[in-house]
Image: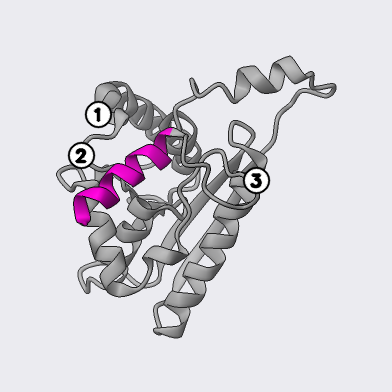
Amino acid sequence: MSLIAWSGGCDSTCLLHQLATNDAYNSPLRTISINHYACNKQQNILQRHARIKILQWFNKRGIEIDHLEVIITSTTVHQKKEDIQIVNDGNMMQPFIWIPTASMYLQNNEDLYVGYVRGDDIWHYRTQICDLFNTMKMMTYKHGNLNFFFEWKRKREVISELKKIGLYDLTWYCESPKRKRPCGQCHPCRIHQLTLKELE
């Protein structure tokens, strides 16, 4: 069994497609998305819209996906502007929110799949991430594994594959959208632009 941490971005969507079209994995696949306060509010909205369109894409092709949306809100009652700036300053790495949260929704003996690719920052913290996952697994009496399915896959391979199957234009990756468009300046946007140039 497998639970896929799915943001609606390129990497996790490519991962979802590979697992969904591979007979070796159980159907329906389960996916989980985490909407959290450390993200730009518009980013959360646009990622959710992307996921809806992608789920429709799969549904039209007869691929069943059991999807769960989790919303994490700030506990600050009277949130100050300074608090928001601290939360959104980019120091909160996505894996430290997604992986422990997703771990709580694992079924027994279910593996958690994440779509981080070669070159992502997560590899600098792999030991800590694995320790965190194993701690959560022990505390919730689960027995699955954390699977880095795209560990050796490069971003250009992901985007190239998504373009071939028609999913690329449905994804969302920008962390600081402006007027519902990618900002072109955040880290994911810069990486994305460099990758597109590689594919030219």
Q: Residue at x 49, y 44 (%)?
A: 174
Task: Write the start and end of the magenta stretch as one range.
Answer: 187-200
Residue 11 rendering spot, x and y as whole percentages: 33, 51
Location of mark 1 (residue): 123
Location of mark 3 (residue): 42
SS for dot 2: loop
User: Between residues 52 and 114, which one lies in front from this camera angle?
Assistant: 52
C-alpha distance separating marks 2 and 1: 8 Å
C-alpha distance separating marks 1 and 3: 28 Å
Residue 198 highlighted magenta (yes or no): yes
Location of mark 2 (residue): 118
Mark closer to the chain start, 3 or 2: 3
Q: Residue at x 65, y 45 (%)?
A: 42
User: CB of mark 2 within 8 Å of CB of mark 1?
Assistant: yes
Residue 138 highlighted magenta (yes or no): no
- Give the amino acid at mark 2: Arg
| Magenta stretch, overall SS | helix
SS for dot 3: helix
Mark closer to the chain start, 2 or 1: 2
The image quadrant where one finds the C terminus is: bottom left
| Dot 2 alpha-carbon crowd within 10 angstroms: few under 14, some 14 to 19, many 20 or more | some
